[in-house]
Amino acid sequence: MDRHRTVAFCFDRIGFAGIGFVIGGYQLFSELFCRYLVISKLGIDKLGLYSPILAWGGLYTTLILPAIYTYLYPRFSESKNNDEISGITNDIFRMLSFYMIPFLFIGIAFRYIIIPIFYSNEFILAANYLPLHFIGIYFFMLTEALSQVFTPKGKIKALGFFRIIMFSLNIFLVTYFINDYGLGAWMLKFLATPLIFFFIFLIYLNITFELKIEIKNIQIISFVLLSSLALLFISEYNQYYAMMVSILLLLLSLKFLTTHEKEILKDKINTMIKG
């Protein structure tokens, strides 16, 4: 009996590793294929034009995502019921939203100033793609937080299936739209795929684990999305108005903090001042 259990355990581990290998390999293929399309259709200089956005966005995700993975996996593994899963998810949604607000609002409103300062005027056209790319980063972070529910709760095959569809969608977006929208097709894979799968994951996890998103989180997510789109619209007509509105929206976002969150923020500010 022990030998049978050992064999079954080994096959389970091999199957788990195999799924990871297939997903990782397909992700690599998807990324290389999309890059090949951009380079072959538009030229390598166009891909280089996008580098400030990737570098800036990558800096943010590199800092935040490892912390999220480290925090969420054991929390979801230890959760005893669906209410705990919902509670953890809602907490991380709020944290991600408030972390993202300054990065997103300032990035959109000040992009025509920041890019030439850190790079050069040769990359100024990258500013056209930055707002929607950053909105995509926001939903990518939320989607990644949701994805952390799958593995510790025994849904690795379902997650693998969704990952394959996600990478296939990236290939489709770049292939189908690159002739008409150029570099905008490359940007779409950073925006459309996370946005679509954010809602797919929400629906799936609601059915599977009765995941519930609190009203206050629906409000803050809606605020972030609508404010970002408003800033994009304003900045297309007047950059200075967009800068002023971005500051006002940053201050307005404080209204979404709970009393406990305001106390934590005040303590952190006082600690920073004293330190």
Image (cartoon, helix red, strand yellow):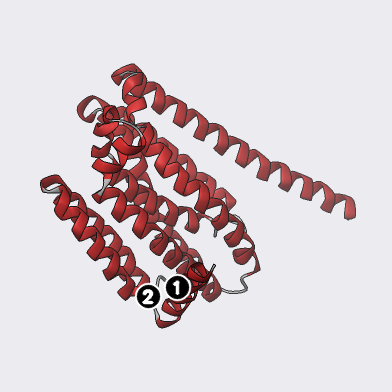
The answer to whether any part of residue 199 appears in the image is: no
Residue 235 at x, y percent in the picture: 17, 48
Q: What residue type is disc 2 on?
A: Leu
Answer few, some or many: residues within 10 Å of disc 1's Cα (few below 14, many 20 plus, some between 14 and 19): few
Specify whether 182 is left or right of 210.
left
Secondary structure category for the residue under label 2: loop
Q: Residues within 10 Å of mark 2 (few under 14, many from 20)?
A: some
- Whichever of labels 2 and 1 marks the residue nearer the N terminus, that label is 2
Q: Residue furthest bottom?
A: 259
Q: Amino acid at mark 1?
A: Leu
Q: Is residue 73 visible?
A: yes
Q: Farthest residue toward the front? A: 274
Per the rendering, the mark at residue 20 is none
Instruction: Identify the residue shown where x is 56% and y is 36%.
Output: 24
Above or below: residue 68 compared with residue 166: below
| Residue under the image location 41 percent in, 50 percent down | 140
Taking the image as shown, residue 128 lies to the left or right of residue 58, namely left
State the residue in front, 121 or 161: 121
Q: What residue sits 48% from the left and 65% below the top?
A: 92
Q: Nearer the viewer, mark 2 or mark 1?
A: 1
Residue receiving disc 2 = 257
Quarter of the figure that contains the N terminus: bottom right
Question: Which x, y percent locates residue 160?
Answer: 54, 45
Q: Which mark is residue 265?
A: 1
- Vertical position of residue 11 compared to residue 266: above or below: above
